[in-house]
Amino acid sequence: MKGLLLVAHGSRKEESNLEIGAVTQRVKYAVVEEYSQVAFAFLELAQPDIATAADELVGLGCSEITVVPYFLAAGSHVVRDIPARIDEVALSHPTVQWSVSPHIGASPLMAAVVAGSAAASSTTESG
């Protein structure tokens, strides 16, 4: 069974953390054909942390887990911290196949997202 884990930074502001849960729900419906389970985790400042969310996916039967860094740029969290946490988690689950995808900011689809956001903004302002 395949699982997908979105990893965001985490915030002291609960509303920001709730946004990640909402995005995860939308992603779940978009990837239902490929991933049986979809979850989210935070690198810091909020729960669940990566280990907790990963343990939950494994407990649900996931034997392959793809981690998606929900970050716009390839800073130290994307390049160093997330892969290091996944390496730590993988030690506890050696039979699980782990992969870390490129961060969302690296997606070729980001240009369309930015353009769509700009269009929505201009529609709202002129409305």
Image: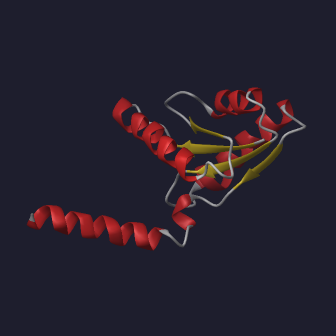
Give coordinates of residue 110: x percent, y percent.
47, 68
Taking 73 as reference, is 68 above or below it?
above
Q: Residue furthest front?
A: 33
Is 43 positioned to the left or the right of 95 in the image?
left
Can residue 34 be seen from the camera position used here? Answer: yes
Say which residue appears at 56% left-offset and 57% top-offset.
Answer: 75
Name which residue lies at 64% across and 61% down. 102
Q: Among all residues in the image, which is located at the extreme left?
A: 127
Residue 69 location (% of width, % of height): 59, 51
Which corner quadrant of the image does residue 85 belong to?
Answer: top right
Label count reads 0
The answer to whether residue 13 shows anywhere in this view is no
Q: Residue at x 78, y 36 (%)?
A: 88
Question: Is 124 placed above or below 42 here?
Answer: below
Q: Is residue 12 left or right of residue 38?
A: left
Residue 43, x across and y down, in percent: 57, 38
- Residue placed most toward the observer, 62 or 48: 62
1 vs 121: above or below: above
| Visual colour scheme | secondary structure
The x, y position of residue 27, in whole percent, is 53, 49
- Figure quadrant of residue 2: top right
